Image (cartoon, helix red, strand yellow):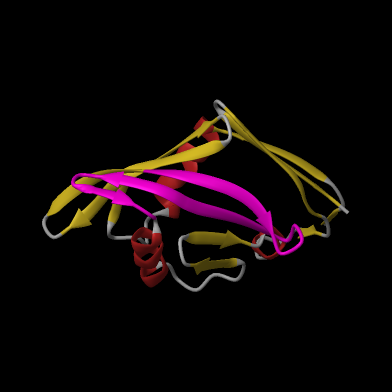
């Protein structure tokens, strides 16, 4: 199968259903949640620091990078008990625990998703690039095309 254009809309419930499986390998983060808001994504959960789980909230920015081939999820602002700052520590913790996955990399405070590579691992081919990202309350729409 080859996709030439795709208009993908995800809502909070779609993502919430997939998060527990996606975070099975990540031992330091529990109870992951995602909420789409106007212009940003909110990622919440609990970060295991020693024996205590510390609730956190990360405000994420989504952008298309590498000429539309990569969806970058930047942890722009992280808030937790007695901490507020950038997301490099969380991304670093994720990078250490995630199994090597073609199409999934990290850089600084960003999680980088090459959608075409991720789909190829599941038997689909996407020849288009990201043309538009729209974040609004409850949903994310990504428009791909050639």
Q: Is residue 60 left or right of residue 6?
A: left
Q: Is residue 35 left or right of residue 1?
A: left
Q: Main secondary structure of the magenta part?
A: strand
Q: Which residue shows up at 50% across the image and 39% down it?
A: 41
Question: Which of 67/55 is in front?
Answer: 67
Q: Is residue 102 left or right of residue 146?
A: left
Q: Which residue shows up at 58% across the image and 35% down it?
A: 39
> Residue 73 in the image: x percent, y percent?
54, 53
Question: Which of 25/91 is in front?
Answer: 91
Residue 84 falls within the magenta-colored stretch: yes
Q: Which residue shows up at 65% across the image and 65% down it?
A: 121
Q: Quadrant of residue 11?
A: top right
Q: Quadrant of residue 23?
A: bottom left
Number of labels in the image equals: 0
> Residue 50 in the image: x percent, y percent?
13, 60
Q: Is residue 121 left or right of residue 74?
A: right
> Residue 103 in the image: x percent, y percent?
62, 67
Q: Quadrant of the C terminus?
A: bottom right
Query: Which residues lie in the magenta part?
Result: 58-86
Looking at the image, can residue 32 be seen?
Answer: no
């Amino acid at each position: 199968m080859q996709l030439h254009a795709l208009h993908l809309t995800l809502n909070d419930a779609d993502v919430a259903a997939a998060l527990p499986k996606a975070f099975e390998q990540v031992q330091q983060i529990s109870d992951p949640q995602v909420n789409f808001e106007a212009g940003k994504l909110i990622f919440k959960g609990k970060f295991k620091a020693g024996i205590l789980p510390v609730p956190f909230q990360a405000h994420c920015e989504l952008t298309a990078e590498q000429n539309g081939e990569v969806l970058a999820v930047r942890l722009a602002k992280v808030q937790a008990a007695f901490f507020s700052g950038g997301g490099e520590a969380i991304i670093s913790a994720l990078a250490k625990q995630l199994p090597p996955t073609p199409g999934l990399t990290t850089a600084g405070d960003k999680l980088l998703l090459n959608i075409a590579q991720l789909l190829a691992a599941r038997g689909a081919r996407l020849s288009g690039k990201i043309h538009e990202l729209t974040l609004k309350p409850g949903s994310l729409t990504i428009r791909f095309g050639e």
